[in-house]
Amino acid sequence: MITDSRPAILSIHAEPDRPFFGEGNIGNADRWHGFEASVRHVQTLREKVGDAFRVHWLIRLDPQVAEIYGAAEWAFDQYGKAIEELLAAGDHFGLHVHTNRLEYPGRGWILNVDDHNWQSHCISSAHDAFNACFGYEPKSIAIGANIISQPLVDMVTGLGFQYDMTTIARTPEMSFNPHLHADGGQPDFSAIDQLPYRASIEDFRTPGDGPLWILPTSSVPAQPADNQLGGKAGTAEDEQTYERFRMRKGSAGIGSAVRKMEADGVTPFLHFACRSNFFNQMDAAQNLEAIVKSCLERDFRFVPADEAVAHYETVSVPDRIAALAD
């Protein structure tokens, strides 16, 4: 349903507190303290600001979780009551999938961005686990380490996903830090606009008339620097670079991003994304409240993906391509 307000999304990746990678790091089945804290903070803030604040959660139910915790559905079994309360408050749940693979004999987790068969297995098995837990198929997905490719887009589209939340607007190709035991890096998203769009069936980076919506994480201008995973941006020093909006910085950067979209004559859109362990930080609740209140003051409402894209259904493909060219 379209309203006069502007759409914003807060997507929280519900997952273990620590990433697992490298030789000998099999992982321990610790509680997800960050997710527990995120639920508390979200519910507390919702009591202050009301139904203008709903969250789009993306939960991990993938083979790495199954290996470490004994079952892909561990989080649903452990936190079922909290999930039920979040759904009752109007929040949505989708999938967050990591595609790390446990290798022998070193028994370490590696990440191969070109292993499409293993990636497909991780996504399809997580899809089935979600269906078993929630009783319906997931419609949204974000792939860990921002790994996405045309084969993966084709695959998730075939599974019935409607919303991809993996990309980061305008960010360049980035290499991963060697300690991640990863081959490759984040793809080049520099051609992806800040606004949601239907992806072309030939190239997900290009607006088209395919069934999958791309909802990029919002980005802000930045100096060339190490990326979130410790790698380096692959751009020339004299080029303007972008990085994902960092929630630890509070509301800084929101105003300039909104003014730029207003100047472009489009309905502004903001997408904030974070791992649930962000909420283990002492100032997490303060930063979250600053972001949400700053957005509400600018006539945004925090909504799930399906409501956000309704604002952009009527924008034609030629208009979107022309806007990107500008």
Image (cartoon, helix red, strand yellow):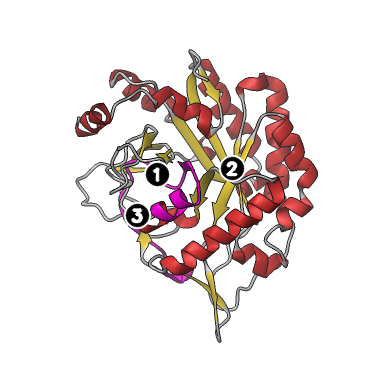
Disc number for residue 150: 3
Q: Secondary structure at mark 2?
A: strand
Q: Which of the 4 image quarters holds residue 82? A: top right
Measured Cα–Cα span from mark 1 to mark 2: 15 Å
Counting residues from the start of the chain, the first of labels 1 and 3 encountered is: 3
Q: Secondary structure at mark 1?
A: loop
Magenta-tinted stretch: 154-182
For the residues labelled 1 and 2, say whether their Cβ atoms are less than 8 Å apart. Answer: no
Using the image as rendered, state which of residue 17 and residue 285 is in the foreground: 17
Q: Position of residue 95 (x, y in %)?
A: 57, 49
For the residues labelled 3 and 2, say whether their Cβ atoms are less than 8 Å apart. Answer: no
Counting residues from the start of the chain, the first of labels 3 and 2 encountered is: 2
Which label lies toward us, 1 or 3? 3
Q: Position of residue 47 (x, y in %)?
A: 73, 23
Q: Residues within 10 Å of mark 3 (few under 14, many from 20)?
A: few
Name the residue beneath numbered marker 1. Answer: 168
Q: Which of the 4 image quarters holds residue 222? A: top left
Identity of the amino acid at label 2? Ile
Q: Residue at x 48, y 17 (%)?
A: 298
Q: Is residue 134 magenta?
A: no
For residue 294, say whether it is visible: no
Identity of the amino acid at label 3? Gln
The quadrant of the picture occupied by the C terminus is top left
Name the residue beneath numbered marker 2. Answer: 12
Residue 33 sits above or below residue 71 on the image: above
